[in-house]
Image: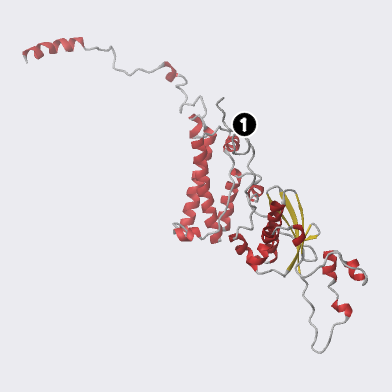
Amino acid sequence: MAMSILRQPIRTSLKRTYSTTRPFVPPAALRDIDNAPRQRTKPRPESPTFYTARSPYYDQLNSLESAIQYSRSALTKFQLLPLPAFARDSLPHLHPVWMDKREMGDALSSKLTTSRYRRVTQLLNELNDHRRIAHAAGCEDLGEGIESIVKLFEKKNQEAILARGKRKPVKFDKYGRSYTLGKRKTSAARVWIIPIAKPSAVPQGQSQTPEEQQPDKLDLTLTGLEDVFSDPKAKPTIPVTPATVLVNNVPLAHYFPIPADRERVIRPLKLTGLLGAYNVFAIVRGGGVSGQSGAVAHGIAKGLAAHEPAIEMILRKAKLMRRDPRMVERKKTGMAKARKRYTWVKR
């Protein structure tokens, strides 16, 4: 205690003192002191993100967040949010195709990493969800405003990308014929399916004339036998009966001598119960008999689904609407065949 009392005057004497109590003013602050208020030498940045390394990216991020906040408040005002899960799932789906990481980086004038690209797509998906709710609820003004923002980040060829996995609709000509293409292994078959013309109703007590008993002109044109029927003495080389299946202008039984191949061809007709209701004409090229029969069956199934949309689910469950992907495995280098190896010899 006595030592601390003795040291106190020493500490007081060693304390640094100044000659004046006025605060220090730097010389730069005295410049233009007469002007009031003081003018800034540098302009204020337009955006707070000016001091970041990626100002355009954060500006777009802030604008997307502001758009989401505005759309959320508008939907909440219309009592459309929060929406139950079952109601959200029942809404019509919109399938946007966003730009990839490189394209979006060029649009934002900033190179994007995977995490930043994921952040932008998350905001866009949320905004697109709000657009879906607005369109379903009839808020067209809000939906169009959101759509104008979303379109800036979608690919230009969005329709072509979305149409890649869709099957093109089968077209019919003026005679009611359908044209489809079937494939299997290295075989390709072009198949035409024609409904059999129904006989015209004859009143009771009347009989048809010989001219009326002849096959319909449409069937003759389709089968290519109009010259045969025009000449009574001519004998047709190919007997045309109801539900004829011709492959390369040869009857089915003659072109495919193996019963398994014939069963494969007429399987779509048997499963759907349409055996005898359609004439089938096919031109098949490439591959062997097994591949050609599978290609013809694939084409027949696609044509029947076009004529009778109600049976498409039956053919789909039987796996006849898609091409059989099984192919011959290629031979490998250093092996006898695809998987067979040469005999190992020690000496």
Please give left or right for residue 117 compared with residue 252 in the image. left
Q: Residues within 10 Å of mark 1 (few under 14, many from 20)?
A: few
Look at mark 1 in the image and give the residue it sits on.
Answer: 334
> Visible in this render: residue 17?
yes
Residue shown at 62% from the left, 48% from the top: 326
Q: Nearer the viewer, residue 183 or 150?
A: 183
Relative height, residue 289 to residue 22 (above, below): below
Residue 83 as seen in the image, left or right of residue 139: left
Three-letter amino acid code at disc 1?
Gly
Residue in view at x 47 percent, y 25 percent? 35
Q: Is residue 281 visible?
A: no
Placement of the N terminus among the 4 image quadrants: top left
Q: Position of residue 124 (x, y in %)?
A: 53, 46
- Residue 207: give x, y in percent of width and height: 84, 85
Q: Residue 290: x percent and y percent?
A: 69, 53
Front residue of 79/262: it is 262
Q: How many marks?
A: 1
Closer to us: 101 or 255: 255
Q: Position of residue 250 (x, y in %)?
A: 80, 59
Q: Is residue 156 above or below residue 241?
A: above
**Which quadrant is home to the C terminus?**
top right
Residue situated furthest left in the rendering: 2
Q: Is residue 96 above or below residue 272?
A: above
Q: Secondary structure at mark 1?
A: loop
Horizontal arrangement in the rendering, residue 22 relative to residue 292 (left or right): left
